[in-house]
Each structure stands twice: as structure tokens, then as C-alpha cells.
Image: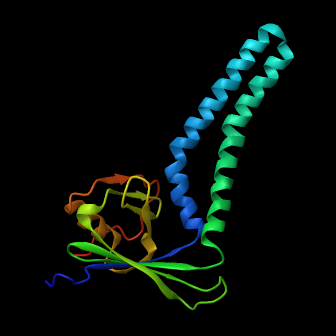
Amino acid sequence: MEENEVLFKNTSKMNDEEISVFQNYALKKTILITSILFTLVFCGVGAGFCFIDLTYGIIFLVCGILGGFVLIPFLMKDSVKKQNKLLLGDKKYLNTFEFCEDYIFVTSQATSSKESNDYQEVASQKIFYRDIFKFVTYKEFMFIYINARQSFILNFRGMTKGTIAEVIELLKGKGIKFVDKSSENMPSMKVKK
């Protein structure tokens, strides 16, 4: 086998929706902790006010529960979506992942506008397996973390050579930490023999 032979290949589009899926996964704990703290503070204040004025106490309790478990998660997710639209602008992106024996070669392409299909290469990067922090599967996506906060987003449906199961086995075989957060059946998970 040649050292630079492409074992598996994936082409995944990247837009604000794909990034929002990643950020919702990454922010799940933050949103939960923020919601709980917000609710506890307002409910604590509400409980204290119940001894002074029952009406204000109940208002604080209701605000704490509604704000903590409805308003805060909605506002945080909406803020992430708006931030992604500003970050990506009016372009379409494609990331191509070529899995070789010792590294992954990632090529990013972008269009000049959302309506056009004039993809131009904007960046490329070689990532050695030893430098990968971890990889996570979530729904029909794989996040390949290059550090604790940054990752590449790979869509299972974008496999053009091999299957996602073979990619997972390759990465596991390289000793990379694997976290499986898939709540749905993963497409193309059967390894071809």
C-alpha cells in the first residue's frame, strides 16, 4: 500500500445549519448549567420574597422557571445561529476529507455567493492522526476535534470512498479517543466485506 494512498474520502457541505448542529452539541452542557443557575437564583429570590410579599415571590418563581428553561436556551441557540450567519456570510462551503494511512488531508472550497456554484479552493490542511484530540459522532455527523474547542464537521452522507464505519474503525485503530453521542441509527454503518 502506498503511503499517500487515499483510503477513504468524504465531501461535506458546510453552512450555518451544520455548524449550528455542532454548536448545539458543544453548548449542551453550558446551556443546561446556565439554565439551572438562572432558575436557582430566581427561585431562591422568589422563595425569600414569599415571606415578605407572596405576589412578588410567585412572580420571581415563575420568571425563574420560564426564563431558565424556555427563554435562556432559546436566546442562546438563536444567538449562535445569528453569529454563524455573520461568520459564513453569503457563501456555500465544501470540505473534502481524504483519509490516508498517517494523516487526513482537508480541502475547503467556497463560492463567491449563495446562488453560484463556482467553488474555489480557499484552504487546505494536513492533520496527522497523532495531533487529533478526539472524534465524536452525533446524529449523522462526525466532529474531528483538532483541540478541545475546534473541530471539523463531517457528514456521514458525504462518503464518496468507503463507509463511515470504516473511517471510525481507522480512527479508533490510531488510538484516538472516540465519543459516541449518536441518538439515531447511523446510515451506512455496515462494514463491507
Q: Which residue is drawn at 53% across and 48% down?
A: 27
State the image quarter where residue 70 is shown: top right
At 46% across and 53% down in the image, what residue appears? 183
Q: Is residue 180 visible?
A: yes
Quadrant (top left/top right/bottom left/bottom right) for the C terminus: bottom left
Corner quadrant of residue 32: top right
Q: Does 4 sit left or right of 77 as displayed?
A: left
Q: Where is residue 84 in the image (x, y as percent from the top left)?
A: 61, 64
Specify the farthest residue to the bottom.
118
Please tell me whether residue 135 is drawn above or below residue 75 in the rendered image: below
Looking at this view, is 101 or 161 the one in front? 101
Counting from the top left corner in percent of width and height, residue 153 is at 45, 67
Query: In the drawing, does residue 40 fall left or right of residue 97?
Result: right
Give residue 62's position: percent from left, percent from top: 77, 27
Whether 115 is drawn above or below 71: the answer is: below
Q: Which quadrant does the N terminus fall into?
A: bottom left
Does any portion of residue 107 appear in the rendered image? no
Badge count: 0
Q: Return the residue nearer the eye: 191 or 140.
A: 140
Residue 177 in percent (x, y) is at: 28, 53
Q: 110 left or right of 188?
A: right
Judged left or right of residue 145, residue 86 is right
> Seen from this angle, which residue lies furthest left?
1
Q: Quick check: 43 above or below 183?
A: above
Question: What residue lies at 30% left-to-right and 73% top-to-bottom?
Answer: 104
Residue 149 versus residue 31: which sits nearer the camera? 149
What residue do we see at 46% from left, 64% from top?
140
